[in-house]
Image: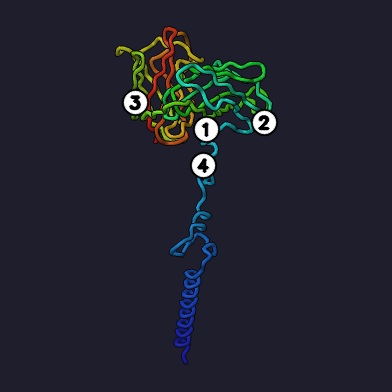
Amino acid sequence: MTSSRLTARRRAIAAAGAATALALTLAACGSSDDSSSMPGMDHGSKSSASSSSSASPSMGDMPGMDMDHLASGNGLSDSQDAYRLTSKDATLPSGKQAAYRFTVAAPDDKPVTDFALDQTKRMHFYAIRSDLTGFQHVHPTMVADGTWSAPLSSLTPGSWRMFASFTPNTGKGKGTDFVLSRTVTVPGDAAKAPLPAPATSTQVDGYTVTVKGDLMAGMAHPLTASIVKDGKPVTDLQPYLDTYAHLTAFHEGDAAFAHLHPTTKVTGDHGGPDLSFHAELPTSGNWRLFLQFQTGGRLHTAALTLRVG
């Protein structure tokens, strides 16, 4: 056999061997039930529910996503970081003034009695009906044993959520902002009211309030509120809670709470017409906004529905 013919035969044998090895590799890969044996590849045509769930990371496991952080501060729990909102009031009367009494328990189960000032108050208290009507924002008083009493005006029948917003001035939670809540029932015929459609403006007491801002869930965005009356910009806003306007929001369906922090500084006795806020709403959907501002010694509360994408 000549040298050239021998070389050609050896090349043919090597090619056949390589083809056989490749075929065996592909067959093994296709028949294997352990997709982890080939990193980055999943050749199976079907996957079980268990393997699918274990292979897919949860939102909280994804880099850059902290769902606990997004969910915290929405006020839908009566406890956080071992601080608890406690109350013996499970029901409140309908159609008349009532006081809701509560305490804030520290991690050592003792009532918290030392609170830091937040917008001139040591405790902000909110009552909201489950359909986001009947909003009330009051500032309760505390007695020496740490019991707070929130004075509420007439409540309509239905389920209400009571929010307490505070910052301990001592203890493990010193300097931490908390929003805790509990629900109460107001007996009677609870007719649910439909939520008004999303809008960028609303009227209250002769004033027109218009908001501007494209909000996305879980992201911080600027929000601007402008106030006019009789077609003229309002410039006689009086300071209220160390700002020219106080803005809170509640989520449709679960009544999750959000406080939109003002960024317009108080520079005198007269403000307006444009007010800016730092808005960071944790979830998408409809939010009911309540803007409170003061003129001539009178407090006005404007409400509108805002859609968050």
Question: Going from the N terminus, do you reach mark 1 or mark 4 first?
Answer: 4
Camera-near label (2 vs 4) is: 2
Camera-near label (1 vs 3) is: 1
Residue 141: image quadrant is top right
Helix, strand or loop at label 4? It is loop
Disc 2 and disc 4 in contact, CB within 8 angstroms: no
Q: In the rendering, which numbered label is found on residue 30?
A: none
Question: Going from the N terminus, do you reach mark 4 or mark 3 first?
Answer: 4
Q: Quadrant of the C terminus?
A: top left
Helix, strand or loop at label 3? It is loop
Residue receiving disc 3: 200
Inter-mark Cα distance, 1 to 4: 21 Å
Residue at horizontal 59 percent and vertical 23 percent from the top: 102
**Depth order, front residue of 17/44:** 44
Name which residue type carries label 4.
Met
Disc 4 and disc 3 in contact, CB within 8 angstroms: no
Q: Is residue 112 left or right of residue 91?
A: right
**Depth order, front residue of 139/61:** 139
Is residue 295 visible to us here?
yes
> From the viewer's perspective, is residue 274 above or below residue 51?
above
Name which residue type carries label 3.
Thr
Inter-mark Cα distance, 2 to 3: 43 Å
Helix, strand or loop at label 2? It is loop
Circle 3 crowding by C-alpha within 10 Å: few under 14, some 14–19, many from 20: some
Question: Going from the N terminus, do you reach mark 2 or mark 4 first?
Answer: 4
Question: Going from the N terminus, do you reach mark 1 or mark 3 first?
Answer: 1
Residue receiving disc 2: 107
